[in-house]
Image (cartoon, grey):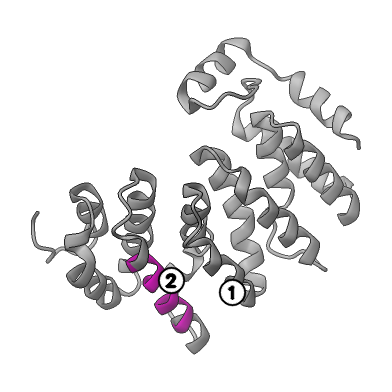
Amino acid sequence: MTVDTALAELQARANTAKAAEMAAYHKVARAYLGVSVPEIGELSDRWRAELALEDRLALAAGLWRTNIHEARVAAAKLLTQARIRPDEAAWRLIAAWVPDFDAWALADHASIAGQRRLVADPSRIDLVETWVTSPHMWTRRAALVMTLPWTKQNFPKDQDLAIRARVLDWCATLAPDRDWFIQKAVAWWVRDLSKHDPKAARGFLDQHGPTLKPFARKETARHLPDAAPD
């Protein structure tokens, strides 16, 4: 499977009208084919099943380099898998994409792939922590999106609790950031945590809520019924 072959399969499903809608919606200057995410998922699932890991990594890297929206989504989906062995090359490739993030959809597809690799080896969070102070907004945001799995555990182990506390510190660092996407990411992380650890979420909101923009404060408190109104 070559990049050209994969692109041909994507282009065979192109929809000009949808491509124009997507370009207007995402507001980033790149090529759009108008292929839906489910269609991309079907293709990437088949490619993933057909390819050895080394070939899959090469295809993902090549598709990402095209800078075509659907090709980048497919690249991320090729590496979205709980178990990849060995997975260091996959993690390095995903991390190398982070500086290229420039829109939420591609950032989120790639970050979901990154989530799987962080869960597989939580020591990689040491690298992710360096992203929190990046001048690149999407890199800062990726630090929170990639660590979302640690908001969802009902019975976290000690290591998981330590990671939760660590990322909550990142949220505190980012709370004064006025960028909408960062405010949204902080709210998203703490809101999801509130479903499983309301005490920790409440403590964050009590301490850092006044620093958040009103919409983010409201979103953070969505599942905390005793939250004080703005």
Mark 2 neighbour density, 10 Å: few (under 14) some (14–19) many (20 or more): many
Seen from this angle, which residue lies furthest bottom? Answer: 158
Seen from this angle, which residue lies furthest top? Answer: 17
Seen from this angle, which residue lies furthest front? Answer: 135
Confirm whether the magenta stretch covers residue 161: no
Magenta residues, dominant SS class: helix
The residue labelled by disc 1 is: 126
Mark 1 neighbour density, 10 Å: few (under 14) some (14–19) many (20 or more): few
Q: Is residue 59 left or right of residue 128?
A: right
Residue 154: quadrant of the picture? bottom left
Task: Kindly identify the amino acid type of the residue bearing the numbered disc 2.
Answer: Val
Q: Secondary structure at mark 2?
A: helix
Please name whichever residue, 154 or 137, is drawn nearer the observer in this view of the structure. 137
Task: Kindly identify the amino acid type of the residue bearing the numbered disc 1.
Answer: Asp
What are the residue bounds of the magenta stretch?
Answer: 162-172
Contact, mark 2 vs mark 1 (Cβ under 8 Å) = no
Q: Residue at x 44, y 82 (%)?
A: 161
Is residue 154 visible to the viewer in this orientation of the structure?
A: no
Q: Which mark is residue 167?
A: 2
Q: Is residue 187 left or right of residue 38?
A: left
Please tell me whether residue 207 is drawn above or below residue 159 in the rendered image: above
